[in-house]
Image: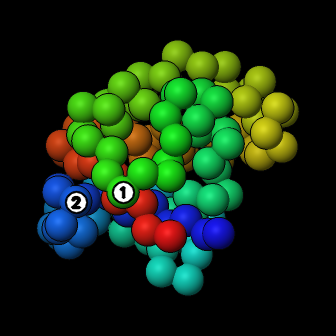
Amino acid sequence: MGLDTFAARTPQDEALSDEDRAAFAGIELCGGMHSGADGSFRGKVYGSLIESVTGVSLYQEWIAPEVVREMAAAFEACDQERVAVEFDCSPVESEQLRRFFQVCGERGLGLVGWW
């Protein structure tokens, strides 16, 4: 089963404003068939890492903005190097995830899971 993860204002509204999309500029995460740019990524690739760091599973239809802010804080507090080694990803990817959740938190965006 795959999982694409999208930043969104509400569970029913996945359309981001131009300003929202611009805020994600420079964040490069693995994409899927329908994700990988403008506030989205392939959640299946990072699911275990994210759940380990934040305690939150991406396998939900909607993750509210306040929870995403907590996820950003968890990434801020974690040891990026340890996470990279434990989950066989680059420290840059871990940092990109932190930035993704930080942008969501700052802009009041939640996450929509599509699988």
Q: Position of residue 33 (x, y in %)?
A: 55, 83
Q: Position of residue 31 (x, y in %)?
A: 57, 71
Whether residues under marks 2 and 1 lie with C-beta atoms below 8 angstroms apart, the answer is yes
Query: What x and y, as percent, mark residue 67?
Result: 32, 32
Please indicate, yes or no, whether residue 52 appears anywhere in the rendered image.
yes
The residue at the point 59 percent across, 35 percent down is 51
Name above or below for residue 2 compared with residue 28.
below
Secondary structure under tag 1 reads loop
Determine which of the numbered discs, if any, sits on residue 61 in the image: 1
- Give the alpha-carbon distance from disc 2 to disc 1, as whole Å: 7 Å
Answer with the quarter of the image where residue 113 lies: bottom left
Q: Which mark is residue 76?
A: none
Look at the numbered disc 2 and give the secondary structure of its residue.
loop
Total residue callouts: 2
Q: Quadrant of residue 82?
A: top right
Q: Which mark is residue 11?
A: 2
